[in-house]
Image (cartoon, coloured by chain):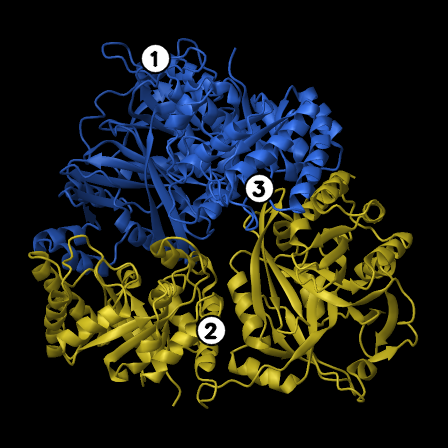
Chain colours: A blue, B yellow
């Protein structure tokens, strides 16, 4: 039987019925009832019990019970009375376990024996009612903040109705070693809570209350923690307990789905060889096979003309649909104007924009199986006779990620689905392949996207960049496959007037913000693009003066960069990045050409401020015209 | 002559011309040109010089020049070349001073003598061109992070073109003592930067880059720092340098105005007795004289009826306008339906809402003079013959704060302006006065409002509360006068579906979110309100079970609270707060009744989650109906 997967109601937005319905809908087995959600609910604990039962959800625990152990009198007696009242609630809820977290009160006595005696008394009272008590060390507990201390108290108390509760955040946030948990008797671990978090250099209480996220979304080794827990023989639920400002405000279904996905992923990472938790492996992805733009007939013409200035040429027409293929080097761009298609629906809702990204994978079926196990919904576009079925996944924003297998020697899906025009790849200004695809997300979507790309395609997040737009900060984090064949920078901005903010407002949601094409020689390519009338983004002269001061570039090289509106970055290892941007198409997406030399791995983030200021200026001028 | 007041361009949003125009428009004397703003500007340094000159702005400094001192070769030579390039820029800009901030590079050598030698060389080169160099210790500098270390290097270098730059944030953030700055020779301090910040327990670099704010908006002793600086005899500009995520995205004029206000305030706090910096004193405020609601004719009727259920009675009609006065105890509420008035304009833009808050001040003229000195705009409503002129200030959101003097023994402005109905105060359910007025702000407005109330009325900010709404966090901070006669909680929420988020969306901006009335006996008052049909917000039974568990209240008291939907809070000193809320009027503002016992000073924040969940439920039900 699969292990029970649970989520604390505090992870989810809305009122208690919203939370329970979402948890059940995405497939959780149970919910931790967070006390605050009970207090604000306008119905009895018995009603919650019924609601959960009707939804097929268990209630494995009620939490938290705070500031209990090792208090002086009269608080000690008061606390035991308080426990009895909460036992009443638990019995009405139909749960047998309460989480006691270590005392944070200044008045708490620093005496493990007293703590053990108090917990023994509470456990004894619980036992009489058929209930149990789990004791957890809070990372900021007054005297008890490590799991070994909590375990010591549980051992001293020595009561069958008292056990230990461990939490990955409380352990890993203070760099406590979870390895020893593996040596505990698994049946004395009464409950396990999992949370991840980005590594932040701040006080642990605020870090915990605002910045936790789901396993796989942060930087803690939650899989290692989970492995230690499972090695103990613990057979109870794995449960998510996340305090996160964005989750509190996010659509509840989306958060719940991300949560379940994170649990499935972390369990498989902790136990990759156990059948009940193992996932179908990640199928290697070798890059972007094509990008598909949702257009209508007039926009198709405009975009085709824009792409023409970048050297793209019509390379094929779909056999049964109003879909065109534009190509250059290894880059394929598809313009879909087919009425009544998924693309038409996308165009209706978001206007001209990328509606699908197709990835070249070694094994589409394996990827689909993994997606299915990770509760990712799939989609097949209706197709004509003889055309290739292209399986697709839904990204967290609802856009499509199509999966294409390209097996050497076999007929490609292009040949199946398109009337191809031969000889198109021959000439052109030198664009070779898609280097990266940058997406703009709405505030609150970053964690969900990071998890999606990690879980489905084995991509890893790179460092966070804070990019200064003239109207606010943009935060950027690239997801990359281990071999860097696929690179997807993700951008998000709380400010509405930044480049990212304007984009998500224009397309009413997340989407592809820009597409970068690799070239061997950015200067040669830029020169040809300029000759074709491509609208390259003008870069201010001051930028080049600073380049000279910072890097001491050769005057002829500097002049070349300046004349072609090329930007320059270099890394500490001698890698060099040369790139240029186009103006945006219809104030939406835009394109970039990039040249990488000497192993440069980044995306030219130090130049992003110059780019965004130039875009804001360009847009302001357009609006005046 | 008044001291020059400047602002760094990085404090302001937009492109460089936007920033310069805003700085000039609000009355700054000069701007620090932040290099990034120059690099992204599409025009030459000479054009910036002309632009600033045309606006009457000086450019006292160009900044920053990073990672200069104590580098090994060949970086040392490269840095001197880089300095020469930046000297070119400075000469084109027409500024003679550059800010060198202490080196953060791992490669930097820990040798003050080497640092001094390098800065001597740079100063000598600057000197040859008629330029100067200022050296500042960054709080996270590799080897130099305190002003005394920077001063030591400046002394060792001993060059007339080299001086010290001090910054309040870099000093106070690491708890360095600024007192000794007073003993420096003032002419060797080349420039002074001021910034405040909330006290946050996090790494200083991230704290500095995202959370600085203007003097008076945070918790650092910027006035004490400024006093030390001025005591040295420093005669140069005081200049603001703030890195703040919200400022980057805020309307530029508003930020600039707040900045200038903060500089004027901090200078007066540092030098209260110097004529050039002194401000007219704060005139004591004894509370809210009245609140004025913008209504139209149908809304007037509905609101009058709503107020009737709270026991308010019509107490007067304005002599010349469609304005009514409702009263109970010491509470005066004004309903303004006068066409073509400021209230009518407010109604047009924001719908039914509070358009003015009148404060009772000891000296309205003194308050106006202080407001004027603090660059606060004022307003007089047109009035009829014999009516009292009511001077008003514009709050940062554009709403009116009216100033009323009530001199004992003199005829009140109510008698001047209204036909009063006698005997109205006699009966009623016991509302005595306005206890507090809570305002909802849009994201980014908190700092500006804190500064406004501090600067104009001498109010001080209380601690920040994070309140859990079912749809996201609400942050709340109360401003209070020293005697607590005026209490104004300010609420803000990034999340759009919280109570605060819905409010600012409904009224299209900031505004009065709820009004709390003081009573001697909340239970008696609530009973009477219920009898009158006041729509009191229903509180869930679970809340009362928890009250019992937490506080062990007497069963009869608990039953009383429960039957009247009263909430209970108590503080560690035995103070008790009993309160209840009404449903909101037209899904906008609502009312609260509060009883304070035993010196309770807060606002019942632990109950806010229960209130907000009940409101969300109430609103959802209304929308269904």
Residue B298 x/y as whole percent: 82, 59
Q: Nearer the viewer, residue A421 or B606?
A: B606
Please report contact status of discs 1 and 3: CB closer than 8 Å, yes or no: no
User: Within 10 Å of the Cα at label 2, are there few (<14), some (14-19), or many (20+) other Cα atoms?
Assistant: many
Q: Is residue B68 visible?
A: yes
Q: Residue at the location (12% across, 68% down)? A: B113
Position of residue A63 measured from the top left corner of the image (x, y, whole percent): 61, 34
Do the dots labelled 2 and 1 sit on one chain?
no
Q: Position of residue A489 (x, y in %)?
A: 34, 38
**What residue sits right under mark 2 in the picture?**
B262
Q: Residues within 10 Å of mark 1 (few under 14, many from 20)?
A: some
- Respond whether the residues carrying marks 1 and 3 are from the same subunit: yes
Q: Can you tell which mark lies on residue B301?
A: none
Q: Nearer the viewer, mark 3 or mark 2?
A: 3
C-alpha separation, residue under disc 3 versus residue under disc 2:
48 Å
Q: Is residue A486 left or right of residue A85?
A: left
Asked if A143 appears above or below B392 in the picture, the reply is above
**Mark 3 touches mark 2? (CB < 8 Å):** no
Mark 3 — residue? A70
Name which residue lies at 47% across and 65% down: B218
Foreground: A321 or A570? A570
Q: Quadrant of residue B339?
A: bottom right
Element at label 1 = helix
Label 1 or label 3, whichever comes before in sequence order: 3
Q: Please, which chain is the residue tagged with disc 1 on?
A: A
Within-10-Å neighbours for mark 3: few <14, some 14–19, many 20+: many
Q: Which residue is mark 1?
A: A416
Query: Where does residue B620 sit, x and y in percent of width and height?
Result: 72, 41
Q: Is residue A319 above or below residue B496?
A: above
Disc 3 chain ID: A
């Amino acid at each position: 039987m699969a292990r029970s997967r649970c989520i604390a109601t505090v992870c989810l937005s809305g009122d208690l019925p919203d939370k329970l319905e979402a948890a059940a809908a995405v497939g959780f087995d149970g919910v931790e009832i967070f006390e605050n959600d009970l207090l604000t609910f306008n119905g009895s604990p018995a009603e919650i019990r019924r609601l959960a039962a009707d939804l097929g959800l268990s209630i494995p625990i009620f939490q938290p019970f705070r500031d209990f152990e090792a208090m002086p009198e009269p608080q000690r007696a008061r606390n035991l009375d308080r426990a009895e009242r909460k036992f009443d609630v638990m019995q009405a809820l139909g749960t047998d376990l309460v989480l006691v977290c270590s005392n944070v009160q200044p008045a708490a006595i620093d005496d493990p024996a007293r703590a053990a005696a108090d917990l023994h008394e509470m456990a004894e009272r619980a036992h009489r009612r058929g209930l149990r008590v789990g004791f957890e060390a809070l990372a900021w507990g007054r005297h008890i903040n490590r799991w070994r201390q909590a375990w010591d108290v549980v051992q001293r108390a020595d009561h069958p109705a008292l056990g230990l509760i461990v939490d990955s955040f409380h352990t890993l946030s203070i760099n406590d070693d979870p390895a020893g948990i593996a040596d505990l008797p698994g049946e004395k671990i009464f409950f396990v809570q999992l949370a991840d978090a980005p590594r932040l250099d701040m006080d642990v209480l605020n870090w915990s209350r605002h910045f936790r996220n789901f396993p796989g979304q942060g930087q803690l080794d939650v899989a290692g923690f989970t492995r230690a827990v499972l090695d103990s023989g613990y057979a109870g639920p794995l449960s998510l307990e996340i305090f996160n400002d964005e989750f509190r405000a996010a659509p509840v279904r989306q958060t719940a789905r991300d949560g379940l996905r994170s649990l499935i992923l972390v369990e498989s990472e902790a136990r990759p060889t156990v059948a009940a938790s193992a996932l179908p492996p990640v199928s290697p992805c070798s890059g972007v096979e094509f990008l598909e733009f949702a257009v209508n007939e007039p926009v198709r013409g405009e975009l085709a003309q824009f792409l023409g200035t970048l050297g793209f040429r019509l390379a094929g027409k779909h056999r049964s649909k109003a879909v065109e293929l534009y190509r250059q080097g290894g880059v394929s761009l598809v313009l879909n104007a087919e009425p009544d298609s998924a693309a038409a629906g996308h165009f209706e809702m978001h206007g001209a924009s990328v509606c699908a990204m197709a990835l070249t994978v070694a094994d589409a079926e394996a990827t689909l199986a993994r997606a299915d196990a990770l509760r990712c919904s799939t989609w097949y576009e209706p197709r004509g006779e003889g055309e290739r079925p292209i399986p697709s996944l839904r990204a967290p924003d609802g856009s499509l990620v199509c999966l294409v297998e390209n097996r050497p020697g076999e007929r490609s899906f292009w040949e199946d689905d398109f009337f191809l025009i031969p000889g198109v790849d021959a000439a052109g200004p030198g664009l070779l392949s898609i280097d990266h695809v940058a997406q703009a997300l709405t505030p609150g979507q970053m964690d969900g996207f990071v998890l999606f790309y990690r879980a489905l395609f084995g991509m890893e997040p790179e460092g966070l960049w804070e990019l200064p737009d003239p109207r606010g900060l943009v935060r950027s984090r690239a997801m990359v496959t281990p071999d860097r064949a696929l690179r997807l920078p993700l951008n998000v901005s709380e400010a509405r007037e930044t480049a990212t903010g304007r984009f998500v407002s224009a397309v009413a949601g997340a989407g592809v913000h820009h597409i970068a094409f690799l070239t061997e020689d950015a200067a040669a390519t830029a020169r040809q693009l300029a000759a074709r009338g491509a609208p390259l983004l003008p870069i201010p002269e001051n930028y080049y003066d600073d380049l000279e001061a910072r890097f001491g570039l050769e005057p002829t090289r500097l002049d070349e960069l300046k004349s072609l509106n090329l930007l320059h970055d270099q890394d500490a290892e001698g890698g060099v990045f040369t790139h240029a941007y186009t103006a945006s198409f219809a104030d939406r997406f835009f394109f970039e050409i990039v040249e990488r030399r000497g192993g440069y791995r980044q995306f030219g983030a130090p130049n992003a401020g110059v780019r965004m200021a130039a875009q804001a200026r360009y847009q302001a001028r357009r609006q005046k015209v």
